[in-house]
């Protein structure tokens, strides 16, 4: 490994495992839901918690990996700038996720 690459953080592998496991659950639920609604019965809104939680876990794992790459590996000279940008990006991603979940829930219950 070249010298300029930082040493791998111990949280990197668990975050990757969690992210891809949650992504598999999310994709599996997306493939399962059309089959559940084939007989014409309305889908139980509580079942939407499965993809909602899975997508949140994907986002949180992605954010954790971004933190390790952009903030934890930065020296003291640019740490504040990286933390501010990371905080804004995190806030934006979670706000978009919350808006999407709220719109989905509203369309299902309406």
Image: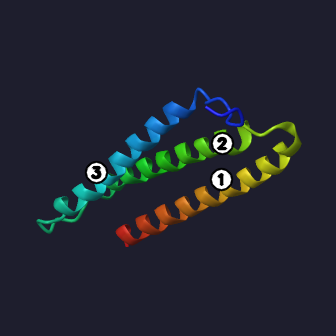
| Residue at (36, 51) in percent of width and height | 26
Left or right of 94 on screen, residue 34: left
Q: CA distance from mark 3 to mark 1?
A: 26 Å
| Residue at (42, 64) in percent of width and height | 105
Tag 1: Cα neighbours inside 10 Å, few (<14), some, or many (≥20)? some
Q: Position of residue 25 (x, y in %)?
A: 33, 46
| Residue at (25, 57) in percent of width and height | 31
Q: Foreground: 55 or 16?
A: 16
Q: Earlier in the sequence, mark 3 or mark 2?
A: 3
97 versus 69 height, above or below:
below
Name which quarter of the figure residue 5 lies in: top right
Q: Which residue is mark 2?
A: 69
Q: Position of residue 36 (x, y in %)?
A: 18, 59
| Residue at (47, 61) in percent of width and height | 101
Tag 2: Cα neighbours inside 10 Å, few (<14), some, or many (≥20)? some
Numbered disc 1: secondary structure: helix
Marks 2 and 1: CB-CB under 8 Å? no
Number of marks in the rendered image: 3
Q: Position of residue 54 (x, y in %)?
A: 41, 48
Q: Foreground: 75 or 100?
A: 75
Name which quarter of the figure residue 8 lies in: top right
């Amino acid at each position: 490994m070249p010298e300029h690459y930082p040493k791998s953080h111990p949280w990197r592998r668990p975050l990757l495992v969690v992210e891809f496991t949650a992504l598999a659950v999310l994709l599996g639920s997306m493939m399962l839901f059309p089959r559940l609604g084939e007989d014409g019965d309305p889908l139980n809104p509580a079942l939407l918690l499965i993809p909602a939680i899975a997508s949140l876990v994907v986002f949180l794992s992605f954010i954790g990996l971004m933190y390790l790459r952009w903030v934890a590996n930065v020296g003291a000279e640019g740490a504040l700038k990286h933390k501010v940008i990371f905080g804004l990006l995190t806030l934006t991603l979670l706000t978009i996720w919350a808006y999407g979940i709220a719109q989905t829930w509203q369309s299902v219950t309406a």
